[in-house]
Image (tube, grey):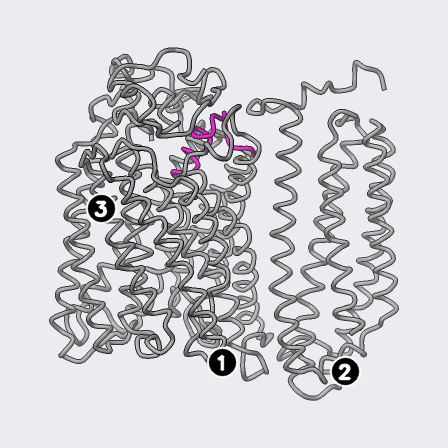
């Protein structure tokens, strides 16, 4: 966590006094920190470990599906593995990674603030994350659950596996998520530097703000629902048990009331990152600032009224299903607004095809492809056939995982110089990006085809006619895993030995680059005053040249 | 209190805020957002109640008639009065009178105890009558509705009871600190937020009472 050898601290362009070495460098100073940057970095480390864990589960699943019959694990272990893969990837990686990791690091920097509004609450949020992860991991080690991450009743209340610790773990993780969201909303409202009006906020902030709204409004309902399942399972109160007059479909309503908006908790921060990256690497201000900003709020709003499309085959009336289907398609409108604005931003821009931009291209493909299949799935007559097949699996991996992972990796490369003061190797970055994007496609395009041919999801064995496409999917997953492993290796190397990046290696006009890299503990020596929006490349000279520290006065004063 | 012991406005300002005014704004906004999440926590239970009341209207009505309405009524009056005394406590805090805040918060705390006492009477009655949730139900009513009613009854009033206990703890701590002169006329936002939380606990009961006892 402390990647700065002493000699290089004196190197030109590396801020000698930064949040990594002051006020102290010991482990205790990290665990007891109130600094949003350190908390953000700790979240990034923790979520990256979760990503590796979930990735290992995924690889075992893919190896198991290499042959039609049993391959490496037995059926029960397989059921546990896909459950744990889902739980770890969703609750431990995708929901917190970008908001709690990069969001924590960047939000106050982009607002010209010294910290988030409630620094102690922020640290509590991190410890709740660790506690929730620990409880969930305990459940995984001691039995694990075989319900799938959706915990559908009545199976989840009757299965022999240990569901309760994982439910409680997710419940605690929910509180971590709520507190982070609450903190970010209050920070955005009250901590903006002078002159930073809502119309000048970086688009990253707009999207993170929309995410936070979902986090605080939807997560309490999930918390209550998981608690009800735990009570039901532990004491048999019968809330969702049809044998006692309970209604299992009510569980599905409750669950998806959170878990569908949760998809936007994962993908809105991805859109936040992309809005920044597309500006910085095409050296143009965003096309249609207001449209992109408001469409984030639009997605957050509409996202609350689409949960019923998960219940098309659960006995919902066709009218209700149709209404939910049409409402779901509204999300496509808001997403399309963003996609068109991002691509319009590229038009006549000065594009530099660096690693973050490569991930932007991958993101765009996954978002559009995944989004279009989403529109198809929201059509009830089609969904009845695709329901619970690999088509759905491939769809949500494209839109949710593909888009989020591309944005996570774009953010990692774009902001690595900001966070660590050091640069990653560009050549390796592009190689890994190509492998990740292609590997992801080769993993999930076969799954679209499998689903279309009727292979159900979550099955341990399958008929031989599905064999070739499953082999292709596993091969793709291997390429993806190698690509991600390369990223992990060179990022770790770069943290220690990477070349000094300078305060602003991208010559970006994003507000967060106005301060030295790595930033000092108080972010800005004097509170900046903003007179224009972010990424205004056209009205100014080319910006701060790479490698030269900025003048002691903030640029905006 | 003399000026030497009264904290100055500047001593309340956290390092990362520009002014006390902004800090107060942030604290208030944060509390209101937190209250919103609390409302949503209960909303899930209320929605569940609505669904099962619709499914088992007769059973729910019969089970609801079995509750001691007078206890619910007394508890409502007690809680509403305790909100009034909390408001009086805040009134004293705005004048810089920490001891007055302590007195009224103590009164509210005691009313919280009264509320819990009545709740205990009620719960022990249910235990003796076998009116328990789900598979533990051994009461007189037939049909699946009554066990479900009691499952929701214990979940809703139990969760509310937990909030009463948390609220009483908050009132005790903040009241005690106010009595020691920890806040001033210029800055008493913790007193205000404690009051807000207690009002929410009260407000939720205002919904629970008619839902469970009356209709």
Residue B170 vs residue A255: left or right?
A: right
The alpha-carbon separation of the residues under discs 3 and 1 comes to 40 Å
Q: Residue at x 35, y 60 (%)?
A: A86
Per the image, label 1 sits on a secondary structure element best described as loop
Per the image, label 3 sits on a secondary structure element best described as helix
Mark 3 and mark 1 in contact? Answer it, CB < 8 Å.
no
Res A361 label: 3
- Relative to A44, residue A196 above or below: above
The alpha-carbon separation of the residues under discs 3 and 2 comes to 62 Å
Q: Residues within 10 Å of mark 3 (few under 14, many from 20)?
A: some
Residue B57 vs residue A476: left or right?
A: right
**Is A112 contained in the magenta span?**
yes
Residue A303: give x, y in percent of width and height.
46, 58
Q: Residue at x 24, y 23 (%)?
A: A501
Label 2, on which residue?
B62
Dividing the picture into quarters, in which one does residue B44 lie? bottom right
Q: Residue at x 37, y 24 (%)?
A: A20
Residue A459: give x, y in percent of width and height.
27, 75
On the same chain, marks 3 and 1? The answer is yes
Q: Chain of mark 3?
A: A
Boundaries of the magenta span: A102-117
Dividing the picture into quarters, in which one does residue A42 lie? top left
In the rendered image, which quarter contains the C terminus of chain A?
A: top left
Q: Chain of mark 2?
A: B
Q: Residue at x 40, y 17 (%)?
A: A555
Q: Residues within 10 Å of mark 1 (few under 14, many from 20)?
A: few
Label 1, on which residue?
A317
Q: Chain of mark 1?
A: A
Prevalent SS, magenta region: helix
């Amino acid at each position: 966590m402390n990647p700065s050898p002493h000699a290089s601290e004196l190197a030109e362009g590396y801020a000698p006094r930064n949040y990594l070495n002051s006020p102290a460098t010991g482990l205790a100073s990290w665990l007891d920190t109130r600094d949003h940057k350190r908390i953000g970095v700790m979240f990034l480390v923790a979520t990256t470990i979760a990503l590796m864990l979930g990735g290992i589960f995924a690889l075992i699943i893919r190896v198991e599906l290499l042959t039609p019959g049993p391959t490496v694990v037995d059926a029960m272990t397989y059921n546990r593995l896909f459950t744990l893969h889902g739980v770890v990837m969703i609750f431990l990686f995708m929901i917190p990674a970008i908001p709690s990791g990069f969001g924590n690091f960047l939000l106050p920097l982009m607002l010209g603030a010294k910290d988030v509004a409630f620094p102690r609450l922020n640290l509590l949020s991190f410890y709740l994350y660790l506690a929730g992860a620990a409880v969930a991991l305990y459940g995984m080690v001691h039995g694990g659950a075989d319900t799938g991450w959706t915990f559908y009743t009545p199976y989840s209340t009757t299965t022999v596996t240990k569901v309760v610790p994982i439910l409680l773990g997710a419940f605690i993780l929910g509180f971590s998520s709520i507190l982070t969201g609450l903190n970010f909303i209050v920070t955005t409202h009250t901590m903006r530097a002078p002159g930073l009006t809502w119309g000048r906020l970086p688009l990253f902030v707009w999207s993170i703000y929309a995410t936070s709204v979902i986090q605080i409004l939807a997560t309490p309902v999930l918390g209550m629902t998981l608690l009800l399942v735990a009570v039901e399972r532990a004491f048999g109160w019968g809330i969702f048990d049809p044998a006692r007059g309970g209604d299992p479909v009510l569980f599905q309503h409750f669950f998806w009331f959170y878990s569908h908006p949760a998809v936007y908790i994962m993908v809105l921060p991805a859109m936040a990152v992309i809005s920044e990256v597309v500006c910085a690497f095409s050296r143009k201000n965003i096309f249609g600032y207001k449209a992109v900003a408001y469409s984030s709020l639009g997605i957050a709003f509409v996202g609350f009224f689409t949960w019923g499309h998960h219940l098309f085959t659960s006995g919902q009336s066709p009218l209700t299903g149709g209404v939910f289907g049409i409402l779901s398609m509204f999300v496509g409108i808001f997403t399309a607004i963003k996609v068109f604005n991002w691509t319009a931003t590229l038009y006549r821009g000065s594009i530099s095809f660096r690693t973050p931009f490569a991930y932007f291209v991958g993101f765009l493909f996954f978002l559009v492809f995944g989004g279009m299949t989403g529109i198809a799935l929201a059509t009830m007559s089609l969904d009845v056939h695709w329901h619970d097949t690999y088509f759905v699996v491939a769809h949500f991996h494209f839109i949710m995982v593909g888009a989020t992972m591309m944005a996570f990796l774009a953010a990692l490369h774009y902001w690595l110089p900001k966070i660590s003061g050091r640069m990653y190797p560009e050549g390796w970055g592009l190689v890994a990006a190509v492998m990740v994007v292609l590997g992801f496609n080769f993993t999930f395009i076969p799954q679209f085809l499998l689903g279309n041919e009727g292979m159900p999801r979550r099955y341990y064995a399958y008929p031989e006619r599905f064999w070739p496409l499953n082999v292709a999917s596993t091969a793709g997953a291997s390429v993806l895993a190698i690509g991600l492993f390369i990223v992990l290796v060179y990022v770790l190397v770069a943290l220690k030995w990477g070349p000094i990046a300078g305060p602003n290696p991208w010559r970006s006009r994003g507000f967060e680059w106005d301060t030295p890299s790595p930033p000092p503990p108080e972010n800005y020596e004097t509170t900046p005053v903003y007179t224009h929006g972010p990424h205004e490349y056209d009205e100014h000279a080319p910006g701060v040249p790479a490698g030269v520290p900025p003048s002691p006065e903030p640029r905006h004063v | 209190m003399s000026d030497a012991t009264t904290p100055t406005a500047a001593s309340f300002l956290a390092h990362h805020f520009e002014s006390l005014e902004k800090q107060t704004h942030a604290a208030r906004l944060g509390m209101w957002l937190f209250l919103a999440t609390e409302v949503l926590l209960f909303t899930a239970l209320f929605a569940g109640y609505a669904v099962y009341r619709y499914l088992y209207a007769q059973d729910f009505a019969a089970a609801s008639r079995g509750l001691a309405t007078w206890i619910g009524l007394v508890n409502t009056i007690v809680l509403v009065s305790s909100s009034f005394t909390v408001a009086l406590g805040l009134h004293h805090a705005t004048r810089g009178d920490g001891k007055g805040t302590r007195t009224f918060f103590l009164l509210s705390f005691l009313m919280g105890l009264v509320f819990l006492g009545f709740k205990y009477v009620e719960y022990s009655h249910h235990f003796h009558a076998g009116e328990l949730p789900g598979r533990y139900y051994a009461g007189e009513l037939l049909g699946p509705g009554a066990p479900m009613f009691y499952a929701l009854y214990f979940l809703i009033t139990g969760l509310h009871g937990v909030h009463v206990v948390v609220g009483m703890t908050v009132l005790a701590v903040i009241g005690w600190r106010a009595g020691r002169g920890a806040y001033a006329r210029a800055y008493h936002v913790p007193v205000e937020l404690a009051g807000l939380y207690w009002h929410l606990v009260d407000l939720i009961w205002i919904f629970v009472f008619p839902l469970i006892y009356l209709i």
